[in-house]
Amino acid sequence: MDPAVSFILTHYKDQEFLKPCIESIKRHVRNFDYEIFVADSETQESTRRLIRNEFPDVILCGSKENVGFSKIVNAALKRTRGSYIAILNSDILLPDSSIENIFRYFEAHKNVGLAGPALFYPDGTPQSSAFRFYSPFTILTRRTFMGKTFLGKHDLDRFLMKDRVLTREPITVDWLMGSALFTTKKALNDVGPLDERFFMYFEDVDWSRRFWEKGYKVVYYPATRLIHHHVKTSKTPRGLLDLLSNPYARIHLASAVKYFLKHGPSTPRYGV
């Protein structure tokens, strides 16, 4: 019998949180049968040993090289059997059983194709994970002094949905951060996998947009709460030298260029 849920845990080298992540799923998911994949780029022998010795029921979907987020997730997606799919960074922990709420939400709302939970830092501080679409100007406001200007601050407030309360009821949003994405096998078959042209960053923006274009809603769902040990690798550079010295910032900008070449500069308001 196929499981109800397929978990895909994205992982790259550092195993500090992988074991606690798997353990938290096993501890708190009780009412749904599930399978777990570890989608692992540049797989280390220590990771293989951890899965083999401590979690023999977990499926390691690895690669010899760092192939990027989209490609390694897609490799795992091809093997999933669940009606519901949860793509989580391996530095995420389930503090309770609230993750089950999101699967029930999908059962009751067939027009929802992509959903994201409320994310919190370990100290309980809320983490931004739902947004309006980027414009080319948003790239400037997030990465240059333009973010301190009147127009820049206004655009950042738009992007970060500062006019909305994100802690009560589910609401539609333009896109969701890829650290924690939930979908259904049916919607996945309609929309297709992640675009592998995005090595890292903007694959979640692109995917969310494609869900909307296929007629599915993208929903921020705060009744599911997860802890994310998030480290911001593409921090806002203070100047050109900082940008040139930060490879993640360069990847982010390269992905932004690919995104706007694909979709154009428009910022449709699919969400609220």
Image: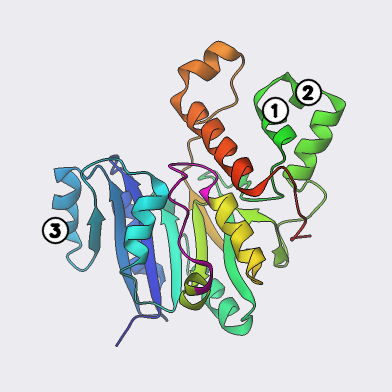
Residue 229 vertical placement versus 26 (above, below)? above
Judge whether residue 197 is colored magenta: yes
Q: Amino acid at mark 1?
A: Leu
Q: Amino acid at mark 3?
A: Arg
State whether residue 23 appears in this view: no
Of residues 131 and 29, the one drawn nearer to the viewer in this rendering: 131
Q: Residue at x 23, y 58 (%)?
A: 60
Q: Earlier in the sequence, mark 3 or mark 2?
A: 3
Residue 83's image quarter? bottom left
The residue that disc 1 covers is 140
Task: State how far apart marks 2 and 1 are (Cα).
Answer: 11 Å
Q: Residue at x 38, y 59 (%)?
A: 74
Decide: few, some or many residues near mark 3? Use Cα within 10 Å; few <14, some 14-19, many ≥20: some
The region drawn magenta spans: 190-203
Q: Position of residue 56 (x, y in %)?
A: 17, 65
> Is 24 placed left or right of 123 in the picture?
left
Q: Earlier in the sequence, mark 2 or mark 1?
A: 1
Judge whether residue 181 is colored magenta: no
Q: Residue at x 53, y 15 (%)?
A: 242
Question: Please, what secondary structure does the residue beneath circle 3 have?
Answer: helix
Decide: few, some or many residues near mark 2? Use Cα within 10 Å; few <14, some 14-19, many ≥20: few
The residue that disc 3 covers is 52
Q: Position of residue 23 (x, y in %)?
A: 32, 61
Which residue in the rendered view is the most extreme toward the bottom? 1
Residue 113's image quarter? bottom right
Task: State how far apart marks 3 and 2 are (Cα).
Answer: 50 Å
The residue that disc 2 covers is 148
Of residues 45 and 120, the one drawn nearer to the viewer in this rendering: 45
Contact? badges 3 and 2 (CB < 8 Å):
no
Majority secondary structure of the magenta segment? loop
Q: Position of residue 81 (x, y in %)?
A: 34, 76
Decide: few, some or many residues near mark 1? Use Cα within 10 Å; few <14, some 14-19, many ≥20: few
